[in-house]
Image (spheres, rainbow, N blue to C red):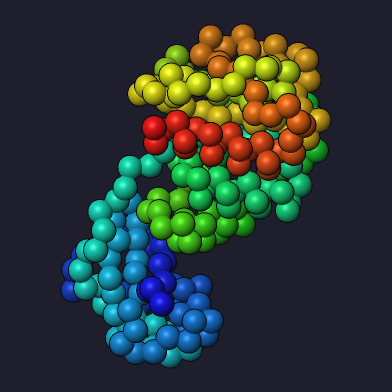
């Protein structure tokens, strides 16, 4: 079995030791039931390190960092602007968007958004766990909740906005993806954007409107489909 991976936000140096957080201590000692001498991999934006458990009790775990085993990989560098949905589908969106490599998640409030607030502590925990599981290095940043109009107004002139639009029949093309501009994927709420909101989105000169399917997709399905498509074009 491969070593477990845990996110460690602070800088790591060879042959230094650290006490694990309460959450990681519980996971290592009581969930995974590791022993002294067990190995754990820790990662952050600087890469991934091997470590050894040098002290272990049920409420105290100390590890020694051994050596760096991986350099950080290039991320997708795309922001997901997602209109908030109910708890379970929102959890899925946070998890799958992280697995698919987004660097930032911005919760959006639109006219048809039923949920107006995001539990940021819970959201952060979900994206960290998804980063650990998916062999990545940097959990996506989770921005403060923002209204659609304010979000569109703050986009800069270099930001390309990919708009998953159920009213458009055109499909996304690889030439739409292959440049160095900042990239944002915008996915609407259940029931889609209102006509006025759609007009406002399309007025942005950097908006690329595209269709994902002839079918009506749920918000979480549309998010996974769009990010998978963008990932595919990045890898071509």
Q: Is residue 65 above or below residue 122?
A: below
> Which of 67 and 150 lies nearest the eye of the viewer?
67
Left or right side of 106 for 49:
left
Q: Can see residue 146?
A: no
Question: Is 111 situated above or below 27?
Answer: above
Answer left or right for 67 relative to 47.
left
Residue 85: quadrant of the picture: top right
Asked if residue 132 lies left or right of residue 86, the reply is left
The x and y percentages for residue 188 are 70, 30
Quadrant of the rendering where the C terminus is positioned: top left
Tell me the residue at 62%/57% (across/down): 122
Name the residue nearer the viewer: 156 or 36.
36
Query: Residue 90: percent from the left, percent from the top?
Result: 68, 47
Judging depth in this view, the residue of 203 and 120 nearest the camera is 203
x 37%, y 21%: residue = 179
For this rendering, which residue is in front, 142 or 186? Answer: 186
Whether residue 228 is situated above or below residue 8 in the rendered picture: above
Q: Within the image, what quadrant is residue 3 found in?
A: bottom left
Rendered position, 16 above or below 72: below
Residue 41 image-quadrant placement: bottom left
Residue 134 seen in the current view: yes
Q: Give the residue drawn at x 53%, y 9%.
A: 205
Q: Point out residue 14 in the picture as x, y percentages from the top left corner.
A: 18, 68
Q: How many marks?
A: 0
Place of residue 129 in the rendered image (x, y in percent of width and height, measured from the top left): 51, 61
The N terminus, quarter of image = bottom left
Q: Residue at x 31, y 87 (%)?
A: 37
């Amino acid at each position: 079995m491969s070593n477990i991976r845990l996110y460690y936000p602070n800088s790591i140096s060879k042959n230094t030791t650290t006490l694990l957080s309460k959450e990681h201590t519980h996971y290592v000692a009581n969930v995974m039931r590791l022993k002294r001498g067990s190995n754990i991999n820790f990662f952050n934006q600087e890469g991934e390190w091997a470590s050894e458990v040098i002290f272990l009790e049920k409420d105290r775990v100390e590890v020694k960092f051994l050596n760096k085993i991986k350099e950080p990989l290039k991320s997708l560098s795309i922001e997901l602007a997602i209109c908030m949905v109910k708890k379970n589908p929102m959890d899925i969106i946070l998890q799958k968007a992280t697995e698919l490599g987004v660097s930032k998640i911005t919760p959006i409030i639109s006219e048809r958004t039923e949920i107006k607030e995001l539990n940021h502590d819970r959201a952060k925990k979900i994206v960290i766990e998804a980063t650990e599981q998916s062999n990545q290095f940097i959990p996506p940043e989770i921005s403060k909740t923002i209204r659609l109009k304010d979000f569109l107004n703050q986009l800069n002139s270099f930001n390309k906005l990919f708009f998953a639009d159920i009213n458009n029949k055109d499909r996304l093309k690889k030439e739409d993806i292959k440049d160095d501009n900042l990239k944002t994927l915008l996915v609407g709420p259940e029931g889609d954007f209102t006509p006025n909101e759609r007009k406002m989105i399309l007025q942005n000169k950097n908006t690329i409107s595209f269709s994902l399917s002839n079918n009506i997709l749920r918000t979480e399905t549309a998010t996974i489909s769009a990010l998978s498509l963008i990932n595919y074009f990045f890898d071509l």
